[in-house]
Image (cartoon, rainbow, N blue to C red):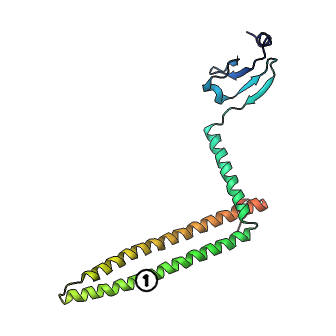
């Protein structure tokens, strides 16, 4: 059936006609709609005169969806940066504040760790003395040593987490600085220097 004859037949009633491409690549006109498995390929809706009322674009491919998702995430990150900072120097100042804060809490944790090690060392000396004199080591001494060892493990984990946080902050602020320079000045990341 030709398109002209089909359209002439459709003029009797005001119906919509769907135009799509089927699996074999043939253009199909159908008044019942597009088969569900072909909707993602895109289609057009025509009026009874053969004019396009609306077009439905093909669904994006997996790669295109991923690219669009990445672009949306980058746009959100860029908007966040522009809300936080008006100049690259503000990123530098924020970085210094954050690193100073992390250095401070890390210093406190390292100081506490040294104090715990000194206490544990004193108790170990006392334990060795009692054993050398063939005396029983009191349970309270053993418990104190156990508590100090557990405290030491926690402090060591804290010191390590502060070190990791400092490294992450340096990377994050460097990245933010480079991106902000691009957003504010149109520079390419290769041209941004500290």
Q: Residue furthest left?
A: 134
Q: Position of residue 165 (x, y in %)?
A: 54, 68
Asked where in the image residue 28 lies, by quadrant, the reply is top right
Residue sitting nearer the eye, 134 or 174: 134
Asked where in the image residue 134 lies, by quadrant, the reply is bottom left
Q: Is residue 73 visible?
A: yes
Q: Is residue 182 left or right of residue 156?
A: right
Name the residue: 75% across, 59% down. 183
Q: Position of residue 161 (x, y in %)?
A: 49, 69
Name the residue: 47% across, 72% down. 158
Residue sitting nearer the eye, 25 or 77: 77
Name the residue: 42% across, 72% down. 154
Q: Is residue 14 left or right of residue 139?
A: right
Q: Is residue 187 visible?
A: no
Determine which residue is flagged by label 1: 114
Whether 79 is drawn above or below 69: the answer is below
Asked where in the image residue 168 lies, by quadrant, the reply is bottom right
Q: Is residue 37 left or right of residue 185?
A: left
> Exactly how many numbered labels are in the figure?
1
- Quarter placement of the C terminus: bottom right
Name the residue: 44% across, 75% down. 155
Q: Position of residue 42 (x, y in %)?
A: 69, 29
Q: Secondary structure at mark 1?
A: helix
Whether 113 is drawn above or below 49: the answer is below
Q: Position of residue 1 (x, y in %)?
A: 73, 9
Query: Callout 1: 10 Å neighbours few (<14), some, many (20+)?
Result: some
């Amino acid at each position: 059936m030709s398109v002209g004859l089909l359209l002439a037949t459709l003029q009797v009633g005001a119906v919509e006609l769907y135009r799509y491409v089927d699996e074999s690549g043939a253009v199909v006109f159908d008044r019942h709609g597009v088969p569900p498995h072909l909707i993602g390929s895109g289609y057009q809706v025509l009026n009874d005169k053969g004019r396009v009322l609306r077009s439905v674009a093909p669904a994006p491919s997996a790669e295109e969806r991923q690219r669009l998702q990445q672009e949306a995430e980058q746009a959100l990150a860029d908007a966040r940066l522009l809300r936080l900072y008006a100049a690259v120097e503000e990123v530098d100042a924020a970085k210094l504040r954050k690193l100073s804060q992390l250095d401070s809490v890390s210093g406190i944790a390292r100081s506490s760790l040294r104090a715990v090690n000194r206490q544990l060392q004193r108790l170990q000396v006392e334990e060795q003395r009692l054993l050398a004199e063939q005396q029983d080591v009191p349970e309270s001494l053993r418990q104190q040593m156990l508590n100090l060892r557990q405290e030491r493990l926690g402090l060591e984990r804290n010191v390590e987490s502060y070190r990791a946080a400092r490294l992450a902050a340096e990377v994050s602020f460097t990245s933010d600085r480079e991106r902000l320079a691009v957003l504010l000045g149109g520079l390419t990341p290769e041209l941004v220097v500290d």
